[in-house]
Image (cartoon, grey):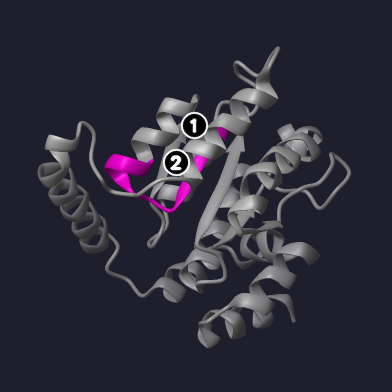
């Protein structure tokens, strides 16, 4: 599985810590991590709004299978990612959140709080969240006897979101201020991940046209 990690400006200084914990969990499982956001506070400037655009491009092009994002509280990142079609992002503050999101919602992105509650032992909490998010069967329901209605409701929610976002995906991006999109896709590591792994030629061509 390909996993994208993306950090925005306010929490970029924690990128090395979060990346290390993610690699510690993902590496032994055979997953590849792409660090596509900000590596430091002096890196290519991104806000949580940009993270939503980046996540949607990577997921809809099938460049990655899962996204780890976040901001100070995690709330802005979650809202930004969920605006876009093809992205189902959950909020994760502790390992039980990651486990329950995996079992019940079976989405493809998590938004973490990298400032709120990020104190003593925070790196351990992050590591355990990644363990719960990336291991075990998905969509099994919790408790187990609740699997059927939970799977049904998750499917209904996906249909509702698709109905509310009927416009073609690329057309939605083209309707945005293109300088916003360009800022989101200008990072070299993001481009390397997308151009190497994209399985959607239209999305790849669109990003290249924005950068041209």
**Residue for point 68% across, 16% down:** 121
Q: Secondary structure at mark 2?
A: helix
Residue 183 placed where, x, y %? 71, 60
Question: For the residue carrying disc 2, how many other residues have a C-alpha within 10 Å: few (<14), some (14-19), or many (20+)?
Answer: some
Question: For the residue carrying disc 1, how many other residues have a C-alpha within 10 Å: few (<14), some (14-19), or many (20+)?
Answer: some
Q: Secondary structure at mark 1?
A: helix
**What number is the disc on residue 75?**
1
**Residue for point 41% across, 40% down:** 90
Residue bearing the label numbered 2: 79
**Residue for point 38% across, 61% down:** 85
Residue 131 placed where, x, y %? 53, 38
Q: Which residue is outermost to the top? A: 120
Which span is picked out in magenta?
102-112
**Residue for point 66% across, 49% down:** 6
Marks 2,1: beta carbons within 8 A: yes
Residue 91 placed where, x, y %? 44, 34
């Amino acid at each position: 599985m390909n996993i994208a990690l993306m950090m925005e400006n306010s929490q970029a200084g924690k990128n090395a810590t979060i990346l290390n914990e993610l690699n510690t969990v993902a590496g032994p499982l055979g997953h590849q991590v792409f660090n596509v956001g900000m590596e430091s506070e002096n890196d290519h400037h991104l806000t949580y709004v940009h993270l939503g655009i980046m996540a949607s491009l990577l997921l809809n092009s099938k460049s990655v299978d899962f996204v780890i994002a976040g901001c100070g509280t995690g709330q802005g990142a979650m809202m930004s990612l969920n605006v876009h079609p093809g992205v189902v992002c959950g909020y994760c503050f502790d390992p039980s959140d990651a486990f329950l999101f995996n079992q019940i919602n079976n989405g493809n992105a998590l938004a973490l709080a990298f400032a709120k509650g990020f104190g003593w032992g925070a790196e351990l909490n992050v590591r355990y969240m990644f363990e719960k998010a990336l291991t075990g069967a998905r969509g099994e329901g919790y408790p187990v006897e609740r699997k059927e209605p939970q799977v049904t409701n998750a499917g209904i929610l996906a249909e509702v979101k698709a109905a509310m976002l009927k416009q073609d995906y690329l057309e939605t991006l083209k309707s945005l201020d293109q300088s916003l999109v360009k800022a989101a896709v200008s990072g070299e590591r993001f481009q390397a991940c997308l151009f190497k792994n994209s399985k959607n030629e239209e999305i790849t061509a669109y990003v290249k046209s924005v950068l041209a």
